Amino acid sequence: MRRTDEDSPALRFEPADDPLGTLAFRRLTDQAHEAFSIALHYQPAEDEEAATREAMSHALSVSFGFAAAALERIATDPRLGLTDEQYLYLRERAAEMDLSVVEDLTGANGDGES
């Protein structure tokens, strides 16, 4: 669904004003936390710095989800005046990167209020 609010910045995230954005952000932070925790658990304890670095690399695996969220927000920014073809192209690329995040942002996974 394309946004119609001309004054709304496309990439700004205000949790209180954006329940769907909050839903997507919570999904991504939960995934990052889980990836970090699991990876850290299985790292040898001898080198704490190396273990933490490896765990962090696993946590950053959610970066495609943040990129998908950015593409979704850009695609729905009415100020860009995208054609339907451009709009669909960006949304398809976002869904390829992280479908769950796109579904969160579009309300397919609930309204973000509950």
Image (spheres, grey):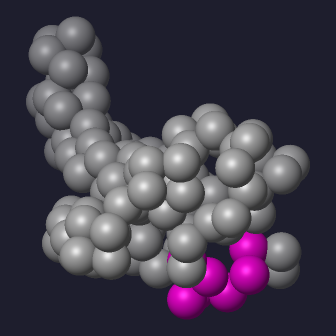
x, y percentage for residue 72?
A: 41, 61
Identified at 44% across, 49% down, the residue is: 80
Quadrant occupied by the N terminus? bottom right
Quadrant occupied by the C terminus? bottom right
Magenta stretch: give its range: 106-112
x, y percentage for residue 20?
A: 67, 67
Identified at 74% across, 81% down, the residue is: 111
- Residue 40 in view: yes
On screen, residue 81 above or below 61 = below
Secondary structure, magenta segment, majority class: loop
x, y percentage for residue 81?
A: 43, 56
Identified at 54% across, 40% down, the residue is: 11
- Residue 62 in view: no
| Count of numbered tags | 0
Position of 50 compared to 9: left or right?
left
Position of 48 compared to 83: left or right?
left
Judging depth in this view, the residue of 77 and 39 nearest the camera is 77
Position of 48 compared to 111: left or right?
left
Magenta highlight on residue 28: no
Position of 78 compared to 87: left or right?
right
